[in-house]
Image (tube, rainbow, N blue to C red):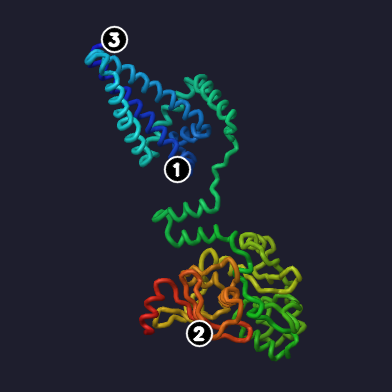
């Protein structure tokens, strides 16, 4: 090396710095590339993606290969710099040459290439895979020995490599991926995907029609009253019971009833014979589980029961699907019958309304971890039935009781965030 002309040495030094930058940038690109995008490209037949995916199956090997090359060229660059410094300025310039080389390597072979690679991982990683894959095959024994020693050190430190480490996303990580997809996934589709992810968080109690709001047919009523109720029913399926909703006799489908009813060929016993056996759901069943149960049992409606077998509410397949796709109703007035907007920006809400329903329809964020209805939320917080005019805050939401009865709150005024100050000014 001492006999080489200075122009050749400078050329070799520049080449070593360039190779160091390529090693550094390709390492960052391979380690930061989107694994799911890479898997998609590989499945589509992209050769570079297929090679990159194979290399990343054992990241310790590709890292070992890159670091071998990077350290080799950096050491060679240091040797060349030393020769150049001795020829030009003598031994007194070695410290200055070492410092200058460190600065150049840091800027042009490390920081700048790695920053560029982090921003353009796919553009660099896929071409690099064409080089690294055959190179790894060529010097595999050296890489294997280096990895053997490195993994031995890790094992001594109790940090042995876990071959079974999973790259699968958790539900929360998947939620973040969906939210950060931006314009790549339409907003409506994002809401649907998030609805699917959130199914396991909610239970049938969160969306059920409460016991006192279940619409059914009491077989103990006179036939004329039953007939009138059937003729004007807005529901496709109705529970049949005797005197108490706990005495369920089955679920009847209106399609099987109306033709006979119109031809006056139906009575109470005939109605009972058309009913299908009731389907019961234990309270606390997650919505994702219940969706599969409905599919397996070929059912669309079920009655939620507690540990004592008492009926707590009613859940339909439509209720669960609405958690994913939103409301099915085409009548906005009907869907918001429990909420009335006021001129001051507040909302009068029926206190028996389900909190999850309110949050979904109104875009609110009332707490859902405890009671299921607004009435239950207020009573749990105050630990008493409040008088009209009482106010309570849940986070950024101010709730004022409008009407209450012996058994709880009937209606309340809700002032969402950003509306509280404006509402007070208008009232004043």
Answer with mark 1 or mark 2, whichever residue precedes in sequence: 1
The answer for how far apart the CA atoms under marks 1 and 2 are is 55 Å
**Along the viewing direction, whichever of 7 and 322 lies nearer the viewer:** 7
Label 1: element kind: loop
Q: What residue appears at the point 41 percent right and 35 percent down from the top-left corner?
A: 28
- Judge left or right: residue 17 versus residue 341: left
Q: Which residue is the site of mark 3? A: 2
Q: Which residue is the site of mark 1? A: 34
Of marks 1 and 3, the one in the foreground: 3
Asked if marks 1 and 2 touch (Cβ < 8 Å), the reply is no
Is residue 337 at all visible to an observer of this figure? Answer: no
Q: Residues within 10 Å of mark 2 (few under 14, many from 20)?
A: some
Q: Quadrant of residue 416?
A: bottom left
- Judge left or right: residue 3 versus residue 341: left
Of marks 3 and 2, the one in the foreground: 2
The answer for how far apart the CA atoms under marks 1 and 3 are is 46 Å
Above or below 93: residue 263: below
Of marks 1 and 2, the one in the foreground: 2
Q: Which mark is residue 389?
A: 2
The answer for how far apart the CA atoms under marks 3 and 2 are is 94 Å
Is residue 176 at all visible to an observer of this figure? Answer: yes
Hey, which residue is sitting farthest top in the picture?
A: 3
Q: What residue appears at the point 44 percent right and 80 percent down from the top-left corner?
A: 341
């Amino acid at each position: 090396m001492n006999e080489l002309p200075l122009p050749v040495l400078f050329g070799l030094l520049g080449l070593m710095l360039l190779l160091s930058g390529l090693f550094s940038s390709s390492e960052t690109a391979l380690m930061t590339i989107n694994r799911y995008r890479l898997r998609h490209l590989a499945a589509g037949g992209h050769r570079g993606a297929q090679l990159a995916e194979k290399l990343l199956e054992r990241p310790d090997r590709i890292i070992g290969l890159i670091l071998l090359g990077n350290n080799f060229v950096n050491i060679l660059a240091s040797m060349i710099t030393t020769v150049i410094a001795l020829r030009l300025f003598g031994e007194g310039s070695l410290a200055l040459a070492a410092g200058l080389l460190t600065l150049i390597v840091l800027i042009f072979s490390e920081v700048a290439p790695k920053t560029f690679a982090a921003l353009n991982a796919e553009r660099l990683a896929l071409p690099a895979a064409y080089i690294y894959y055959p190179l790894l095959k060529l010097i595999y024994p050296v890489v294997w020995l280096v990895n053997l020693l490195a993994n031995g050190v890790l094992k001594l430190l109790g940090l042995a490599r876990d071959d079974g480490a999973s790259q699968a996303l958790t539900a929360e990580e998947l939620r973040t991926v969906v939210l950060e997809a931006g314009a790549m996934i339409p907003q409506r589709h994002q809401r649907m995907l998030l609805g699917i992810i959130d199914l396991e968080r909610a239970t049938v109690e969160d969306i059920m029609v409460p016991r006192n709001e279940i619409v059914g047919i009491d077989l103990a009523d006179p036939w004329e009253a039953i007939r009138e109720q059937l003729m004007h029913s807005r529901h496709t399926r109705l529970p049949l019971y005797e005197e108490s909703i706990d005495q369920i006799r089955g679920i009847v489908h209106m399609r099987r009833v109306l033709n006979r009813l119109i031809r006056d060929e139906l009575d109470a016993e005939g109605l009972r014979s058309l009913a299908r056996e009731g389907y019961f759901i234990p309270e606390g069943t997650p919505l994702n589980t219940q969706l599969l149960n409905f599919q397996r049992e070929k059912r669309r409606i079920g009655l939620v029961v507690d540990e004592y077998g008492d009926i707590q509410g009613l859940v339909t397949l439509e209720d669960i699907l609405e958690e994913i796709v939103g409301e099915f109703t085409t009548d906005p007035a009907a869907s918001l019958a429990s909420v009335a907007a006021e001129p001051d920006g507040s909302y009068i809400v029926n206190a028996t309304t389900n909190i999850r329903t309110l949050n979904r329809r109104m875009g609110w964020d009332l707490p859902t971890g405890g009671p299921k209805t607004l009435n239950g939320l207020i009573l749990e917080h105050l630990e008493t039935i409040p008088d009209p005019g009482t106010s309570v805050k849940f986070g950024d939401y101010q709730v004022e009781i409008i009407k209450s009865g012996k058994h709880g709150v009937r209606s309340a005024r809700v002032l969402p965030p950003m509306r509280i100050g404006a509402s007070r000014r208008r009232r004043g």
